[in-house]
Amino acid sequence: MHITCVTVDCADPAAVAHFWNEALRWGGVTVSGSGNGATCRPPSGGPYLEFIRVPERKITKNRLHLGCAVDALDELDTEIARLQVLGATLAWEEEFPPEIAARYRNVVLRDVEGNEFCLGAGDSTAA
């Protein structure tokens, strides 16, 4: 068995797919003819993200979220700013003891519909 995609329930599949496509710098968005679904895929193939319209609104914290990363700790604030321009909002930053925080940070953001995702940077083995 292997993972082929991660499916996200949402109100506006096209908008959420476009956010993630730009956030991940992937290869483009495909929206179903009905508008009830959309996908974005990495240009090199492999697992992709699928967004499906559901009638109910998001109410609580996600039970599953995407974990993303930038390579260098000094890139994190620039990447957060880029994601905020795309529509992400800052939720919170994990707190670590000073010796870990000097080498690794993990920030929780929300996409355009409020779905939480992590953005980490630095030496994740320190955490």
Image: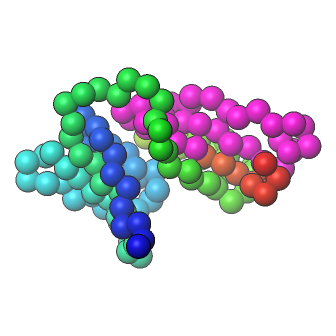
**Residue 87 visible in image:** no
Q: Is residue 119 left or right of residue 64?
A: right
Q: Is residue 15 left or right of residue 78?
A: left
The structure residue drawn at horizontal position 78% and vertical position 48%, both measured from the top left corner, is: 127
Viewer-nearest residue: 78 or 94? 94
Spot the residue most to the front: 1
Spot the residue most to the left: 34
Q: Residue 24's spot in the image, x, y percent?
A: 46, 56
The structure residue drawn at horizontal position 83% and vertical position 41%, both measured from the top left corner, is: 101
Spot the residue most to the right: 99
Q: Is residue 73 magenta?
A: no
Viewer-nearest residue: 53 or 81? 53
Q: Residue 104's spot in the image, x, y percent?
A: 78, 48
Q: Is residue 22 left or right of residue 9?
A: right
Q: Is residue 94 magenta?
A: yes
* Quarter of the image where one finds residue 112: top left
**Residue 12 visible in image:** yes
How many numbered callouts?
A: 0
Q: According to the image, what is the colour scheme of the structure?
A: rainbow
Q: Residue 84's spot in the image, x, y percent?
A: 50, 36
Q: Is residue 31 left or right of residue 21?
A: left
The structure residue drawn at horizontal position 24% and vertical position 46%, both measured from the top left corner, is: 52
Please report the bounds of the magenta region as a residue range. 89-118
Identify whether 91 is placed above or below 126. above
Identify whether 70 is placed above or below 9. below
Q: Residue 119's spot in the image, x, y percent?
A: 60, 46
Spot the residue most to the bottom: 44
* Quarter of the image where one finds residue 77: top right
The structure residue drawn at horizontal position 40% and vertical position 50%, both measured from the top left corner, is: 20
Image quadrant where one finds the N terminus? bottom left
